[in-house]
Protein backbone atom coordinates (compact mmCIF):
# COMPACT_ATOMS: atom_id res chain seq x y z
CA UNK A 1 0.00 0.00 0.00
CA UNK A 2 1.16 3.52 -0.77
CA UNK A 3 2.39 5.68 2.12
CA UNK A 4 -0.71 7.64 3.12
CA UNK A 5 1.23 10.11 5.28
CA UNK A 6 3.56 10.96 2.40
CA UNK A 7 0.61 11.43 0.05
CA UNK A 8 -1.14 13.77 2.51
CA UNK A 9 1.98 15.91 2.84
CA UNK A 10 2.17 16.15 -0.96
CA UNK A 11 -1.50 17.06 -1.22
CA UNK A 12 -1.05 19.81 1.37
CA UNK A 13 1.93 21.19 -0.52
CA UNK A 14 0.19 20.99 -3.89
CA UNK A 15 -2.93 22.72 -2.56
CA UNK A 16 -0.88 25.76 -1.61
CA UNK A 17 0.51 26.19 -5.11
CA UNK A 18 -1.28 28.73 -7.26
CA UNK A 19 -3.83 31.39 -6.41
CA UNK A 20 -7.06 29.66 -7.48
CA UNK A 21 -8.63 28.81 -4.14
CA UNK A 22 -12.23 29.20 -5.32
CA UNK A 23 -14.70 31.62 -3.74
CA UNK A 24 -16.04 31.41 -0.19
CA UNK A 25 -19.82 31.33 0.33
CA UNK A 26 -21.09 34.89 0.09
CA UNK A 27 -24.70 34.53 1.26
CA UNK A 28 -23.80 33.75 4.90
CA UNK A 29 -21.83 36.76 6.22
CA UNK A 30 -19.93 34.75 8.84
CA UNK A 31 -18.63 32.43 6.10
CA UNK A 32 -17.92 35.26 3.65
CA UNK A 33 -15.24 36.58 6.02
CA UNK A 34 -13.24 33.31 6.12
CA UNK A 35 -9.79 33.36 4.48
CA UNK A 36 -10.05 31.02 1.46
CA UNK A 37 -6.31 30.24 1.43
CA UNK A 38 -6.52 27.39 3.94
CA UNK A 39 -6.32 23.63 3.48
CA UNK A 40 -6.56 20.63 5.79
CA UNK A 41 -6.98 16.90 5.30
CA UNK A 42 -7.40 14.08 7.82
CA UNK A 43 -7.76 10.33 7.20
CA UNK A 44 -9.12 7.98 9.88
CA UNK A 45 -8.06 4.49 8.85
CA UNK A 46 -9.82 1.26 9.75
CA UNK A 47 -6.70 0.18 11.68
CA UNK A 48 -7.28 3.05 14.14
CA UNK A 49 -4.68 5.52 12.87
CA UNK A 50 -5.54 9.18 12.25
CA UNK A 51 -3.23 10.78 9.68
CA UNK A 52 -3.35 14.52 8.98
CA UNK A 53 -1.77 17.39 7.07
CA UNK A 54 -2.29 21.12 6.72
CA UNK A 55 -4.54 23.33 8.88
CA UNK A 56 -6.08 20.26 10.53
CA UNK A 57 -6.48 21.88 13.97
CA UNK A 58 -8.51 24.84 12.70
CA UNK A 59 -12.25 24.42 13.44
CA UNK A 60 -14.61 25.26 10.58
CA UNK A 61 -18.36 25.39 9.99
CA UNK A 62 -19.36 21.96 8.69
CA UNK A 63 -22.71 23.24 7.35
CA UNK A 64 -24.51 20.65 5.17
CA UNK A 65 -22.23 17.80 6.21
CA UNK A 66 -24.41 17.54 9.33
CA UNK A 67 -27.21 16.36 7.04
CA UNK A 68 -25.71 12.88 6.98
CA UNK A 69 -25.90 12.70 10.78
CA UNK A 70 -29.46 14.05 10.96
CA UNK A 71 -30.51 11.61 8.24
CA UNK A 72 -29.05 8.70 10.22
CA UNK A 73 -30.96 9.87 13.31
CA UNK A 74 -34.22 10.41 11.38
CA UNK A 75 -34.06 6.92 9.86
CA UNK A 76 -33.33 5.49 13.29
CA UNK A 77 -36.40 7.21 14.70
CA UNK A 78 -38.84 6.77 11.82
CA UNK A 79 -37.48 4.07 9.53
CA UNK A 80 -38.47 3.89 5.88
CA UNK A 81 -41.62 5.97 6.40
CA UNK A 82 -39.30 8.98 6.00
CA UNK A 83 -39.21 8.22 2.27
CA UNK A 84 -42.90 9.12 1.94
CA UNK A 85 -41.85 12.70 2.70
CA UNK A 86 -38.55 12.97 0.79
CA UNK A 87 -37.09 11.20 -2.24
CA UNK A 88 -33.79 9.49 -2.96
CA UNK A 89 -32.94 10.85 -6.40
CA UNK A 90 -30.22 13.32 -7.51
CA UNK A 91 -31.59 16.83 -7.89
CA UNK A 92 -29.80 18.09 -10.98
CA UNK A 93 -30.44 21.60 -9.67
CA UNK A 94 -28.94 23.99 -7.14
CA UNK A 95 -29.16 22.85 -3.52
CA UNK A 96 -31.61 25.62 -2.61
CA UNK A 97 -33.89 25.46 -5.66
CA UNK A 98 -37.44 26.63 -5.04
CA UNK A 99 -38.54 25.86 -8.61
CA UNK A 100 -37.87 22.14 -8.27
CA UNK A 101 -39.73 21.90 -4.95
CA UNK A 102 -42.78 23.56 -6.53
CA UNK A 103 -42.62 21.32 -9.61
CA UNK A 104 -42.61 18.24 -7.38
CA UNK A 105 -45.44 19.50 -5.18
CA UNK A 106 -43.49 19.84 -1.96
CA UNK A 107 -41.71 16.46 -1.84
CA UNK A 108 -37.97 17.22 -1.96
CA UNK A 109 -35.89 15.20 -4.40
CA UNK A 110 -33.44 13.94 -1.74
CA UNK A 111 -32.50 14.54 1.93
CA UNK A 112 -29.28 16.45 1.16
CA UNK A 113 -30.65 19.43 -0.74
CA UNK A 114 -31.90 22.14 1.60
CA UNK A 115 -35.61 21.36 1.28
CA UNK A 116 -34.96 17.67 1.96
CA UNK A 117 -32.79 18.43 4.96
CA UNK A 118 -35.50 20.71 6.36
CA UNK A 119 -37.95 17.80 6.17
CA UNK A 120 -35.39 15.49 7.79
CA UNK A 121 -34.85 18.02 10.58
CA UNK A 122 -38.62 18.19 11.08
CA UNK A 123 -38.64 14.39 11.43
CA UNK A 124 -35.86 14.52 14.02
CA UNK A 125 -37.76 17.21 15.94
CA UNK A 126 -40.98 15.23 16.19
CA UNK A 127 -42.89 16.62 19.16
CA UNK A 128 -39.76 17.75 21.01
CA UNK A 129 -38.23 21.16 21.57
CA UNK A 130 -35.36 22.35 19.35
CA UNK A 131 -33.05 22.17 22.37
CA UNK A 132 -33.89 18.47 22.85
CA UNK A 133 -33.44 17.64 19.16
CA UNK A 134 -30.16 19.55 18.95
CA UNK A 135 -28.99 17.74 22.08
CA UNK A 136 -29.56 14.40 20.33
CA UNK A 137 -27.77 15.56 17.16
CA UNK A 138 -24.75 16.88 19.05
CA UNK A 139 -24.60 13.73 21.20
CA UNK A 140 -24.65 11.56 18.07
CA UNK A 141 -21.85 13.55 16.41
CA UNK A 142 -19.75 13.53 19.57
CA UNK A 143 -20.23 9.78 20.00
CA UNK A 144 -19.26 9.19 16.38
CA UNK A 145 -16.17 11.40 16.70
CA UNK A 146 -15.17 10.19 20.15
CA UNK A 147 -14.83 13.84 21.18
CA UNK A 148 -16.89 16.09 23.46
CA UNK A 149 -15.14 19.21 22.14
CA UNK A 150 -17.70 19.83 19.37
CA UNK A 151 -20.05 22.80 19.62
CA UNK A 152 -22.46 24.99 17.71
CA UNK A 153 -21.13 28.40 16.66
CA UNK A 154 -23.98 30.69 17.71
CA UNK A 155 -22.71 33.58 15.59
CA UNK A 156 -22.88 31.44 12.44
CA UNK A 157 -26.37 30.20 13.39
CA UNK A 158 -27.52 33.80 13.92
CA UNK A 159 -26.00 34.81 10.58
CA UNK A 160 -27.85 32.00 8.79
CA UNK A 161 -31.11 32.92 10.51
CA UNK A 162 -30.80 36.60 9.57
CA UNK A 163 -29.99 35.89 5.91
CA UNK A 164 -31.74 32.55 5.32
CA UNK A 165 -34.63 34.00 3.32
CA UNK A 166 -34.59 31.27 0.67
CA UNK A 167 -34.66 28.56 3.34
CA UNK A 168 -37.65 30.27 4.93
CA UNK A 169 -39.34 30.26 1.52
CA UNK A 170 -38.62 26.53 1.13
CA UNK A 171 -39.94 25.78 4.62
CA UNK A 172 -43.14 27.76 4.11
CA UNK A 173 -43.75 26.03 0.78
CA UNK A 174 -43.24 22.65 2.46
CA UNK A 175 -45.75 23.68 5.12
CA UNK A 176 -48.22 24.76 2.42
CA UNK A 177 -48.03 21.21 1.03
CA UNK A 178 -48.48 19.63 4.48
CA UNK A 179 -44.91 18.33 4.53
CA UNK A 180 -43.92 19.93 7.84
CA UNK A 181 -45.26 18.79 11.19
CA UNK A 182 -43.76 21.73 13.08
CA UNK A 183 -43.80 25.44 12.29
CA UNK A 184 -41.26 26.67 9.71
CA UNK A 185 -39.67 28.88 12.38
CA UNK A 186 -39.19 25.97 14.80
CA UNK A 187 -37.77 23.65 12.15
CA UNK A 188 -35.43 26.26 10.70
CA UNK A 189 -34.21 27.29 14.14
CA UNK A 190 -33.11 23.69 14.63
CA UNK A 191 -31.77 23.38 11.08
CA UNK A 192 -29.65 26.54 11.19
CA UNK A 193 -28.14 25.53 14.52
CA UNK A 194 -27.11 22.00 13.55
CA UNK A 195 -25.58 23.32 10.31
CA UNK A 196 -23.53 25.72 12.48
CA UNK A 197 -21.61 22.92 14.19
CA UNK A 198 -17.86 23.51 14.14
CA UNK A 199 -15.30 20.73 13.82
CA UNK A 200 -11.72 20.19 12.75
CA UNK A 201 -10.97 17.82 9.89
CA UNK A 202 -9.64 15.36 12.46
CA UNK A 203 -12.91 15.40 14.39
CA UNK A 204 -14.92 15.11 11.18
CA UNK A 205 -12.87 12.20 9.86
CA UNK A 206 -13.31 10.42 13.19
CA UNK A 207 -17.05 11.16 13.14
CA UNK A 208 -17.35 9.57 9.70
CA UNK A 209 -15.97 6.23 10.91
CA UNK A 210 -19.47 4.92 11.65
CA UNK A 211 -20.01 4.85 7.87
CA UNK A 212 -16.84 2.83 7.16
CA UNK A 213 -18.38 -0.42 8.47
CA UNK A 214 -15.24 -1.96 9.92
CA UNK A 215 -14.78 -4.15 13.02
CA UNK A 216 -13.25 -1.37 15.14
CA UNK A 217 -15.61 1.38 13.94
CA UNK A 218 -18.36 3.00 16.07
CA UNK A 219 -21.51 0.86 15.93
CA UNK A 220 -24.18 3.56 15.62
CA UNK A 221 -26.30 2.24 12.74
CA UNK A 222 -26.81 -1.16 11.12
CA UNK A 223 -24.59 -2.38 8.23
CA UNK A 224 -27.65 -2.31 5.95
CA UNK A 225 -28.29 1.36 6.78
CA UNK A 226 -24.59 2.20 6.35
CA UNK A 227 -24.74 0.90 2.78
CA UNK A 228 -27.82 2.97 2.05
CA UNK A 229 -26.40 6.15 3.57
CA UNK A 230 -23.24 5.73 1.52
CA UNK A 231 -25.31 5.14 -1.62
CA UNK A 232 -27.15 8.42 -1.05
CA UNK A 233 -23.89 10.24 -0.40
CA UNK A 234 -22.51 8.95 -3.70
CA UNK A 235 -25.55 9.89 -5.79
CA UNK A 236 -26.73 13.05 -4.00
CA UNK A 237 -24.00 14.25 -1.62
CA UNK A 238 -22.62 17.03 -3.81
CA UNK A 239 -25.86 18.57 -5.09
CA UNK A 240 -25.86 19.11 -8.86
CA UNK A 241 -22.12 18.29 -8.85
CA UNK A 242 -22.67 14.76 -7.51
CA UNK A 243 -22.11 13.07 -10.86
CA UNK A 244 -18.88 14.98 -11.43
CA UNK A 245 -17.64 14.08 -7.93
CA UNK A 246 -18.47 10.38 -8.44
CA UNK A 247 -16.70 10.44 -11.82
CA UNK A 248 -13.56 12.16 -10.55
CA UNK A 249 -13.26 10.92 -6.96
CA UNK A 250 -15.19 7.66 -7.03
CA UNK A 251 -16.27 7.33 -3.39
CA UNK A 252 -19.30 8.47 -1.35
CA UNK A 253 -18.99 12.02 -0.05
CA UNK A 254 -20.98 14.84 1.54
CA UNK A 255 -20.00 18.47 1.11
CA UNK A 256 -20.83 21.68 2.94
CA UNK A 257 -20.63 25.32 1.86
CA UNK A 258 -18.15 25.94 4.68
CA UNK A 259 -15.64 24.19 2.40
CA UNK A 260 -15.62 20.80 4.10
CA UNK A 261 -16.12 17.37 2.56
CA UNK A 262 -16.60 14.07 4.39
CA UNK A 263 -15.76 11.10 2.15
CA UNK A 264 -15.92 7.38 2.88
CA UNK A 265 -13.85 4.49 1.56
CA UNK A 266 -16.04 1.54 2.58
CA UNK A 267 -14.22 -0.84 4.87
CA UNK A 268 -11.03 1.23 4.80
CA UNK A 269 -11.16 4.90 5.75
CA UNK A 270 -13.09 8.05 6.60
CA UNK A 271 -11.62 11.19 5.03
CA UNK A 272 -12.29 14.82 5.88
CA UNK A 273 -10.91 17.66 3.81
CA UNK A 274 -11.44 21.39 4.21
CA UNK A 275 -10.64 24.39 2.07
CA UNK A 276 -13.17 27.25 2.25
CA UNK A 277 -13.09 28.33 -1.39
CA UNK A 278 -15.87 26.73 -3.44
CA UNK A 279 -16.22 25.62 -7.06
CA UNK A 280 -19.19 26.39 -9.33
CA UNK A 281 -21.27 23.64 -7.69
CA UNK A 282 -20.79 25.08 -4.19
CA UNK A 283 -18.31 22.36 -3.15
CA UNK A 284 -14.73 22.84 -1.94
CA UNK A 285 -12.49 23.53 -4.94
CA UNK A 286 -9.14 22.47 -3.45
CA UNK A 287 -10.82 19.77 -1.36
CA UNK A 288 -12.32 18.06 -4.41
CA UNK A 289 -8.98 18.21 -6.24
CA UNK A 290 -7.17 16.68 -3.26
CA UNK A 291 -9.68 13.85 -2.89
CA UNK A 292 -9.40 13.01 -6.60
CA UNK A 293 -5.62 12.76 -6.25
CA UNK A 294 -5.84 10.75 -3.01
CA UNK A 295 -8.26 8.12 -4.32
CA UNK A 296 -6.17 7.74 -7.47
CA UNK A 297 -2.91 7.35 -5.54
CA UNK A 298 -4.45 4.87 -3.08
CA UNK A 299 -6.63 3.06 -5.64
CA UNK A 300 -9.59 3.78 -3.36
CA UNK A 301 -12.26 4.38 -5.99
CA UNK A 302 -15.16 1.96 -5.50
CA UNK A 303 -15.42 1.52 -9.27
Image: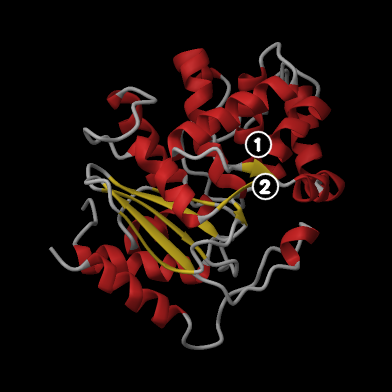
Instruction: Assign a secondary structure to mark 1.
Output: helix
User: Going 23% across and 36% down the picture, which residue do you hit?
Assistant: 214
In the rendered image, residue 186, in percent from the top left (x then y), is placed at 79, 25
Splitting the image into 4 quarters, where does residue 23 fall? Answer: bottom right
> On the image, numbered disc 2 is attached to which residue?
96
Position of the N terminus, as image quadrant, is: bottom left
Please give the count of numbered marks on the rendered protein.
Answer: 2
Splitting the image into 4 quarters, where does residue 26 fall? Answer: bottom right
- Residue 115's label in the rendered image is 1
In the rendered image, residue 13, in percent from the top left (x then y), is placed at 40, 81
Query: Eyeballing the image, is 129 above or below 209?
Result: above
Query: Eyeballing the image, is 210 above or below 250?
Result: above
CB-based contact (under 8 Å), mark 1 and mark 2 = yes
Residue density around tag 2, few if under 14, some if 14–19, many if 20 or more, within 10 Å:
some
User: Going 76% across and 50% down the picture, which residue do you hit?
Assistant: 156
- The furthest residue to the top: 127
Which comes sooner in the sequence, label 1 or label 2? 2
Q: Is residue 285 left or right of residue 194?
A: left
- The furthest residue to the front: 148
Amino acid sequence: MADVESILRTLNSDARQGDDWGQVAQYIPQLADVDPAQFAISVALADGRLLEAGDCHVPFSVQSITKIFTLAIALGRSGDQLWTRVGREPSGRAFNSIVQLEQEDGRPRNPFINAGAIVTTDEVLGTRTPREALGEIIAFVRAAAGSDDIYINDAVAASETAYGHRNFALAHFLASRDNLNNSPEKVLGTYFHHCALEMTTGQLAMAGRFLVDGPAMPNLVSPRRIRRLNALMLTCGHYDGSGDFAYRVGIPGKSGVGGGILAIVPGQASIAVWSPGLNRYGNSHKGTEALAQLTTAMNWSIF
